Structures are given as structure tokens and as C-alpha cells.
Image (spheres, grey):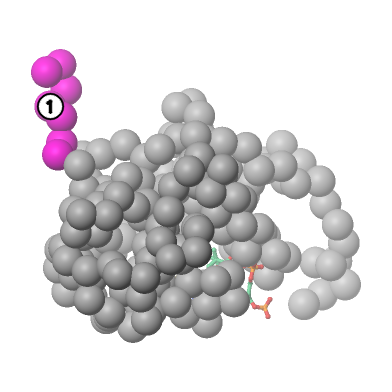
Amino acid sequence: MTALARLPEPRIFAPERPRDLRLVEGLVARAFGPGRFAKTAERLREHREPILSLSFVAWCDGEAVGCVRLWAIAIGDTPALLLGPIAVEEDWRSRGLGADLVRRVVEAATAAGHGVILLVGDAPFFGPLGFAAGPARDVRLPGPVDQRRVLVLALRPGAADHLSGAVVAPPVVAKGA
Ligand SMILES: CC(C)(COP(=O)(O)OP(=O)(O)OC[C@H]1O[C@@H](n2cnc3c(N)ncnc32)[C@H](O)[C@@H]1OP(=O)(O)O)[C@@H](O)C(=O)NCCC(=O)NCCS
């Protein structure tokens, strides 16, 4: 890390607004590339809307430099949230923004009364933020996935103790219906 990268910069984590859609989609497209639509987690997001009040954009010097989204899902009979995608603009990485974005959505989801967050991601990054594969061992995603990358965080004690079953998203409501 360079000395410049350690300088503090003004950063704001604001809930995503409908007008941020293009910025967020741009960030995610640059971070993940075209393969992102083939991911199993995408099956839980396609044709659905994230929970904007629990999705955050990181702003530095007026520029949108990171984002993270939460989505409503259920794990078996347990209501839960899906975290992802999370992305930080390449030039802004390794300054703690990614970890701060995760902490921000965890704080917001806890305050809103949710019990469990699930994601498909890298344990070396999410493990230190409290996510673990153990509580997700009996959880089934709607497609191929490395089960070691299915990670869960309990937002209150015991909330992830007995998770099992299929991960499903709410039914898609046709526009205009
Ligand atoms: C993952 C991501 C959001 C992290 O953002 P960030 O602002 O750099 O995160 P932080 O500064 O809080 O943490 C960075 C540290 O996490 C580590 N890290 C980042 N991504 C990682 C990963 N996939 N696996 C393991 N460690 C990772 C980095 O090596 C870095 O360590 P360093 O500071 O010692 O260099 C960012 O790297 C990104 O947008 N990546 C592309 C999209 C992506 O892969 N997202 C999902 C990751 S599962």
C-alpha cells in the first residue's frame, strides 16, 4: 500500500437511490465483467429489486466508488437477506472501503430487525467480518456452487443455528400486474 493510499479521504455511505442505478450497474460491470450473470446467486436476483434502504453506495469526493446490495430471500422457512454484489472501483481498493460497506449493511440490516445474511463469496475477505460456512452446510442454492463459499452471518444470537433447505427468492411480480 502506498503512502497516498493511507491518507484519509472524505467518505460517505448512503443508501442506494433509484437514480444511482446506472452508477451501481457500472461499478458492478467493471468489477465482475460479463460472467456475472452466470453466477448462481444471480438466479436469486434476476427480475427482482434489491432492498434499497439496505443497499449502500460509498461516495468519496462526490464520486460513487463502491456499492453493496441486499436482497430478500428465504432459507427453507427462515427469512433472510442475500448480500451481493459488492464492488469497489479498482483505484479505491485496499483502503478499507469494502469492509466498511459490509459493516454498514450489517448494521442497517440488524437495526431493521433482520436475523440472517447469506452470501456466496471468498472466506478470506468475509470471514474476518463475521461470515462463516459452517451454519450454511445444509443450505442449498439454486445452482452449482462451491459450498465452502456459501457464508452466513447471524445478526442476533442463534439466528443461524438451524438453517437448512433451499434458498429461494420472492416470486417475481410482473410489471403492471
Ligand atoms: C472485494 C472488494 C469489494 C474489496 O474492496 P476493498 O475496498 O479493496 O476492501 P478492503 O480495503 O476493505 O479490504 C481489502 C483487503 O481484502 C483483500 N481482498 C479483497 N478481495 C478479496 C478476495 N476476494 N479474497 C480474499 N481477500 C480479498 C485484499 O487483498 C485487501 O487486502 P490488503 O488490504 O492487505 O491489500 C474489491 O476488491 C472488489 O470490488 N473486487 C472485485 C469484485 C469482487 O470480487 N467482489 C466480491 C468478492 S468475494
Q: Quadrant of the N terminus?
A: bottom right
Q: Is residue 53 left or right of residue 103?
A: left
Q: Is residue 169 left or right of residue 84?
A: left
Q: Is residue 132 visible?
A: yes
**Residue 66 drawn in magenta:** no
Q: In this rendering, is residue 77 above or below 14? A: below
Residue topped by disc 1: 174
* Place of residue 9 in the rendered image (x, y in percent of width and height, measured from the top left): 83, 52
Residue at figure coordinates x 81%, y 46% from the top left: 10
* Place of residue 42 in the rendered image (x, y in percent of width and height, measured from the top left): 25, 56
Number of on-image labels: 1
Q: Is residue 39 left or right of residue 84?
A: left
Quarter-of-image position of residue 170: top left
Nearer to the camera, 151 or 145: 151
Which amino acid is tagged 1?
Answer: Ala
Nearer to the camera, 115 or 128: 115
Residue at figure coordinates x 61%, y 57% from the top left: 103
- In the orientation shown, which residue stands out farthest toward the top? 176
Q: In this rendering, is residue 79 above or below 126? A: above
**What SS does tag 1 mark?**
loop
* Place of residue 161 in the rendered image (x, y in percent of width and height, measured from the top left): 36, 70
Span highlighted in magenta in the image: 171-177
